[in-house]
Amino acid sequence: MSDLAGVEAALAADRAESVLRLTDLRSQFARTVEASRDTNADDEHDPEGATIAYERSQLSALIDQAQRRLGALDVALARAHEGTYFVCEVCGGPIAPERLEARPFARTCIVCAASHPG
């Protein structure tokens, strides 16, 4: 995936999929909240499974993860438009195409990623 047009198309497709996922997760969260609003179920002591609070927490974490991915994809698209997509932000060297294929929003080469985690 070393041609810029292909990269931009792949990032745009990934972004569109992420937007759909985020929309679906937000809808699930709203349905979960709405479903629990009119019940007086004691979900804390329900032996049948996870609590409603746990489900909300899980969905909230997935929403947060999807939002972070969407933000990372937006940065990757901006880098592609600027012509810096294949360039490590730390050392200025190239980012291996295999790394970008596995992690399309990577901003550093593998050496810098290993020595500058986070």
Image (cartoon, grey):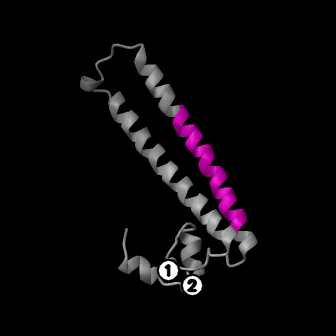
Q: Specify whether residue 75 is in view.
A: yes
Which element carries disc 1, helix, strand or loop?
loop
Residue to which mark 1 is pinned? 109
Nearer-the-camera pick, 77 or 54? 77
x 68%, y 79%: residue: 2
Does 114 appear above or below 54? below
Q: Is disc 2 surrounded by few (<14), some (14 to 19) or many (20+) residues within 10 Å?
A: some
Q: Quadrant of residue 116?
A: bottom left
Does 55 appear above or below 96? above
Question: Horizontal placement of 73 versus 29: left or right?
Answer: right
Question: Horizontal placement of 40 versus 86: left or right?
Answer: left
x 54%, y 55%: residue: 71
> Residue 64: x percent and y percent?
45, 46
Residue 25 is a magenta residue: yes
Residue type for callout 2: Pro
Ranked by sequence position, the earlier of labels 2 and 1 is 2
> Residue 25: x percent and y percent?
52, 39
Does 69 appear above or below 42? below
Contact, CB < 8 Å: mark 2 with mark 1?
yes
Q: Specify whether residue 50 is in view.
A: no
In magenta, the rendered stretch is 8-27
Q: In which quadrant will I find the C terminus? A: bottom left
> Residue 4: x percent and y percent?
72, 74
Q: Quadrant of residue 24?
A: top right
Which element carries disc 2, helix, strand or loop?
loop
Label 2 to label 1, Cα distance in Å? Answer: 7 Å
